[in-house]
Image: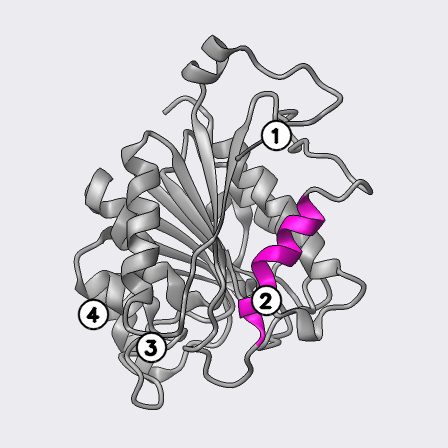
């Protein structure tokens, strides 16, 4: 159903037809997590933070859900931790794109990005990706699992779903993943070299993937794998502000409520939903 702010006049029918819709899709799965489970419970908690009466639904640029941003909450996918889950995720993002909407996926662990990008690329062709993370997630496999949450970008690149991958905030690059980055031509902005103005922003069609552990644990404690020395929320937003046009899709993943403090990380995730949705409705 479409979500509108009740205190504001709803857009007219013709206004809605001219707007880009954003489809919010929950992907509640953490079966490919390597150490701690918990992100499967994230989508509902992020939604609760997004629509909490303690805040409002305006992005920093002024666009508001229900006014300029037509957000359709598609609910959570009926994932079962079985072999059909990837097909369900891909079908959901593909259907959103085919309808002229922009899918915004709420994970779940980072393994959901592979089928999500596959669905977007089925409509838009190979995408470019701007990826925020502490880890490059380029393992060929981890613990024998090629669908590990540590491997989605290896799967994406080897499948030819992306023509360019820029990773921001990386601070755990081991030898194997350095080799994988070189193999796939990945551009890595290490956290120790970070300056928002120097982050290369890929051209359209652009997909944005945010692993919340890309943020420093001081800003996002509710993640499974804490890695100190990360991005602040403002630094991440400064990079997003440099995207010149619209995005064709995105995801926010790896929120683990078991380790959150006073809902801090859920609030951050909700803010990122608003900011990504505001980017999605920009003119291409």
Q: Earlier in the sequence, mark 4 or mark 2?
A: 2
Which residue is located at x 43 percent, y 77 percent? 31
Return the residue nearer the eye: 245 or 222: 222
Q: Earlier in the sequence, mark 3 or mark 1?
A: 1
Q: Which mark is residue 177?
A: 3
For the residues bearing labels 4 and 1, Cβ distance under 8 angstroms: no
Rounded to the nearest whole Å, what is the CA distance between mark 2 and mark 1?
Answer: 24 Å
- Name above or below for residue 178 compared with residue 243: below
Return the residue nearer the eye: 8 or 282: 8
Look at mark 2 in the image and give the residue it sits on. Answer: 41
Give the structural element (helix, strand or loop) at label 2: helix
For the residues bearing labels 2 and 3, Cβ distance under 8 angstroms: no
Where's the C terminus, which quadrant? top left
Crowd rating for badge 4 (residues with CA inside 10 Å; few <14, some 14–19, many 20+):
few
Which residue is located at x 43 percent, y 47 percent? 250
Look at mark 1 in the image and give the residue it sits on. Answer: 65
Q: Quadrant of residue 82?
A: bottom left
Q: Can the viewer see residue 202 in this picture? A: no
Return the residue nearer the eye: 284 or 274: 274
Q: Main secondary structure of the magenta part?
A: helix
Rounded to the nearest whole Å, what is the CA distance between mark 4 and mark 2?
Answer: 35 Å
Q: Is residue 55 left or right of residue 18?
A: right
**Image: magenta residue range:** 38-50
Which colour scheme appears in the figure? one colour
Question: x%, y% of residue 105?
Answer: 46, 51
Question: x%, y% of residue 119?
Answer: 27, 50
């Amino acid at each position: 159903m479409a979500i509108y702010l009740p205190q504001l006049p709803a857009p007219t029918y013709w206004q809605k037809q001219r707007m880009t819709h954003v489809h919010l899709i929950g992907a509640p799965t953490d079966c490919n997590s390597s150490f701690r489970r918990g992100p499967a419970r994230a989508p509902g908690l992020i939604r609760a933070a997004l629509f909490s009466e303690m805040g409002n639904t305006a992005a920093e640029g002024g666009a508001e859900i229900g006014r300029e941003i037509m957000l359709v909450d598609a609910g959570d996918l009926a994932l079962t931790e079985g072999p059909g889950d990837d097909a369900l995720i891909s079908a959901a993002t593909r259907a959103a794109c085919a309808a002229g909407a922009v899918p915004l996926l709420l994970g779940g662990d980072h393994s959901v990005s592979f089928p999500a990008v596959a669905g977007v690329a089925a409509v838009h062709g190979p995408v470019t990706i701007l990826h925020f993370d502490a880890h490059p997630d380029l393992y060929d496999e981890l613990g024998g699992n090629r669908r590990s949450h540590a491997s989605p970008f290896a799967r994406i690149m080897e499948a030819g779903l992306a023509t360019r991958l820029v990773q921001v905030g990386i601070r755990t690059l081991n030898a194997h993943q350095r080799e994988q980055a070189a193999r796939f031509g990945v551009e890595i902005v290490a956290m120790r070299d970070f300056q928002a103005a120097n982050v290369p922003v890929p051209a359209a069609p652009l997909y944005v993937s945010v692993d919340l552990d890309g943020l420093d644990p001081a800003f996002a404690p509710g993640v499974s794998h804490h890695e100190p020395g990360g991005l602040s929320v403002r630094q991440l937003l400064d990079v997003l502000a440099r995207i010149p046009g619209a995005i064709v899709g995105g995801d926010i993943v790896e929120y683990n409520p078991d380790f959150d403090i006073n809902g801090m990380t859920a609030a951050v995730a909700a803010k990122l939903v608003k900011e990504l949705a505001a980017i999605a409705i920009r003119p291409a």
